[in-house]
Image (spheres, helix red, strand yellow):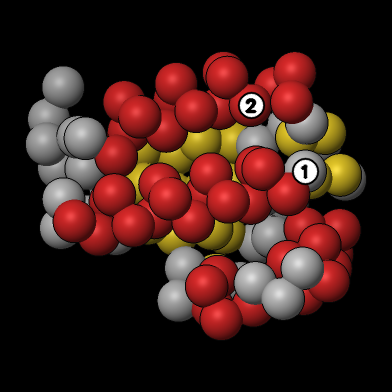
């Protein structure tokens, strides 16, 4: 796999404890190899743990000198971020 690969991870409609392991595994692989794009338009419900996991992944990508972007976050995801007071943490990674 090329270190310049653009890794896109599509988030499922429901991001809960049952889906976190699979998402985490994909993120771990992606943030080690290149820029990461998170496709978040389908998200209908997102757990607090999932949002913290995305913040952590973004920080790891930054340390690896790779871009980390969340594209077209759904209204449900944006609402959850704002409700939890995490807007500042997500502001740099949101696209569209």
**Relative to 53, does residue 71 appear above or below in the rendering?**
below
The image position of residue 17, as x and y in percent, is 74, 26
The image position of residue 31, as x and y in percent, is 29, 39
Q: Which residue is drawn at 56% across and 81% down?
A: 88
Q: Which residue is drawn at 44% across and 25% down?
A: 26
Q: Residue at x 52, y 73 (%)?
A: 89
| SS at badge 2 | helix
Q: Which residue is drawn at 65% across and 37% down?
A: 11
Residue 38 makes an appearance in the image:
yes
Disc 2 to disc 1, C-alpha distance = 9 Å
Q: Residue 18 — which label?
A: none
Is disc 2 surrounded by few (<14), some (14 to 19) or many (20+) residues within 10 Å? Answer: some
The residue labelled by disc 2 is 20
The residue labelled by disc 1 is 47
The image position of residue 8, as x and y in percent, is 45, 39
Left/right of residue 27 with respect to residue 41 in the rendered view: left
Left/right of residue 49 with respect to residue 42 in the rendered view: left
The image position of residue 62, as x and y in percent, is 25, 59
Quadrant of the rendering where the C terminus is positioned: bottom right
In which image quadrant can residue 67 be found?
bottom left
| SS at badge 1 | loop
**Relative to 28, does residue 92 appear above or below in the rendering?**
below
Sequence-wise, which precedes: disc 2 or disc 1? 2
Residue 42 makes an appearance in the image:
no
| Mark 2–mark 1 CB contact (< 8 Å) | yes
């Amino acid at each position: 796999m090329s270190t310049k690969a653009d890794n896109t991870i599509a988030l499922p409609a429901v991001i809960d404890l049952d889906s976190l392991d699979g998402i985490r595994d994909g993120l771990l692989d992606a943030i080690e190899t290149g820029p990461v794009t998170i496709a978040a338009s389908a998200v209908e419900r997102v757990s607090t743990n999932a949002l913290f996991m995305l913040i952590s992944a973004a920080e790891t990508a930054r340390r690896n000198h790779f871009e980390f972007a969340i594209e077209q976050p759904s209204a449900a995801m944006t609402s959850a971020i704002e409700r939890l007071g995490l807007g500042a943490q997500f502001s740099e990674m949101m696209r569209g």
